[in-house]
Image (tube, rainbow, N blue to C red):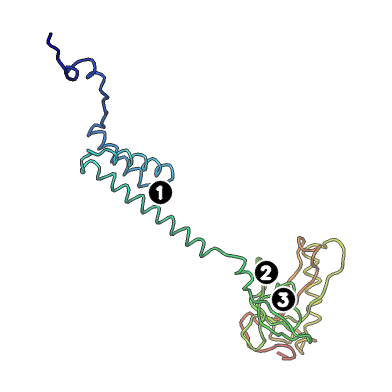
Amino acid sequence: MTSVEGGPVAGGPAAAQAPMVARTTPETLRRQSWWALALALPPLLVTQVAAVTLTVLVLAERDGETRRTTPARAAVAVMTFWVLLAAFGLVLALVLAPSDEDDDATRWATWQSDGTLDVQGAVPVAQLRPGDCFSPLPSDGVLLADVVRCTTSHDAEVFHVFTLPEGPYPGDDDVRRLARGTCWSAFEAWVGVPWADSALEFAFDLPTQTSWDQRRDVTCYLTTYSPVTEQLQGSAR
């Protein structure tokens, strides 16, 4: 009896069981490649994730033609650009962000034991004292004054500081009236001539209803409403 040795006959049952590898069609590959590029353009996290996914799928097709995968390769370049730009922005933000060291670098004014200015620098407006020459003029939102020697250009000179009586806040009009009267009375003693005969003006920094419980001090100061480089005490101007 003749026997026949060898593998299964072509087309037999074993051949029918061979695994089939699905490949993405060229048209689908082209569409995915263009979609990857389109999704990579907006600098949004969700579109970037989708672009990465599609790009990986497209470039994983080993037999994909270059002309079909070129947009996906361009998407890689676009995504790389966004990553580098984000990294640069993060570094820039860290460099420019204010820190506690910046606050510590503020130069604060100091005085000698006799009350004369020792070191020029910043001081809260509410802590100015008679004889201090400073800039800028107090206004809403200005918390610090720059105290300088009176021979340095400045906007104002403090000539009197007093404290309003304790009790409930008397109201804006009464606070202003009391401040004006007291500052007016102190003007002549500091300048050397009455306010009516002087070329100088005076103004005052007031406590507010909000700050009344913590501060009731009124700061009276002289000004010509233009910078000066001399002390006005005793000037008889």
The residue identified by callout 1 is 43
What element does badge 3 sit on?
Answer: strand
**Between 30 and 237, which is closer to the camera in this rendering?**
30
The residue identified by callout 3 is 203
Residue lying at the far bottom of the rendered structure: 235
Circle nearer the N terminus (2, 1): 1
Q: Position of residue 191 (x, y in %)?
A: 75, 87
Circle nearer the N terminus (3, 2): 2
Residue in view at x 86 percent, y 69 percent: 165
Q: Nearer the viewer, mark 1 or mark 3?
A: 1
Q: Position of residue 17 (x, y in %)?
A: 26, 19
Q: Quadrant of the C terminus?
A: bottom right
What element does badge 2 sit on?
Answer: loop
Residue in view at x 27 percent, y 24 percent: 19
**Between 236 and 92, which is closer to the camera in this rendering?**
92
Residue in view at x 45 percent, y 58 percent: 89
Say which quarter of the image contains residue 56. top left
Say which quarter of the image contains residue 142. bottom right
**Between 87 and 7, which is closer to the camera in this rendering?**
7
Q: Position of residue 216 (x, y in %)?
A: 81, 68
The residue identified by callout 2 is 143
